[in-house]
Image (spheres, rainbow, N blue to C red):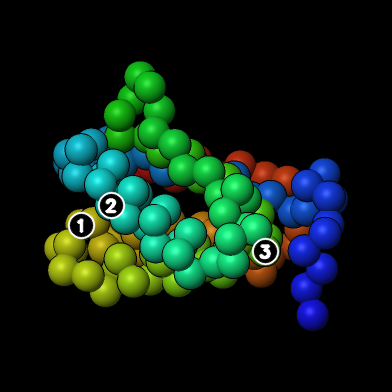
Amino acid sequence: MQNHNVPPSLQANFHIIMDEEKLGIKPDVLFKVYQTIDTKARQLAPKELNEELKLAQDGRSKTRFYVTVSKRMAPHLMEAIQLSITADYGLELSSYLQKLQEQLMVQLFGPYEQTTFNVRL
């Protein structure tokens, strides 16, 4: 059984930076996909976990996105990403989302370190 009263300072948080500059996917398309993932992850998760997910677009480089997620919220984010991968977004965007999911899995199942991934495709 999970303890939902763990203070935020003791929770494992994962940080991923996704930069899609070379794939040629339009920033507004990426933004909509991230909005969809964010909405779906929050729907799948218990309400008390919704504040443990932050998805943000870089102000200067519109193709760069930042993901910060707690260990407790990560499974819901993974499921939301998987649902987006199976949507009909096309090969390039599906590959991008698979890379995002892969980087999250590396952090979840790899040795614990507070690390940041900067992924360029």
Q: Is residue 85 left or right of residue 67?
A: left
Mark 3 vs mark 1, CA separation in Å? 29 Å
Q: Position of residue 47 (x, y in %)?
A: 58, 61
Q: Disc 3 residue type?
A: Arg
Q: Quadrant of the N terminus?
A: bottom right
Comparing marks 3 and 1, which lies closer to the viewer?
3
Crowding at dot 2, Cα within 10 Å, few <14 / some 14-19 / many 20+, comes out as some
- Quick check: 67 above or below 99? above
Mark 1 vs mark 2, CA separation in Å? 13 Å
Q: Quickly name the residue at label 2.
A: 33
Q: Which mark is residue 29?
A: none
Q: Residue furthest bottom?
A: 1
Q: Disc 2 residue type?
A: Val
Front-most of 30 and 109?
30
Q: Position of residue 102 (x, y in %)?
A: 48, 63
Residue drawn at x 30%, y 68% as measured from the top left: 85
Which mark is first along the chain, 1 or 3? Answer: 3
Q: Quickly name the residue at label 1.
A: 92
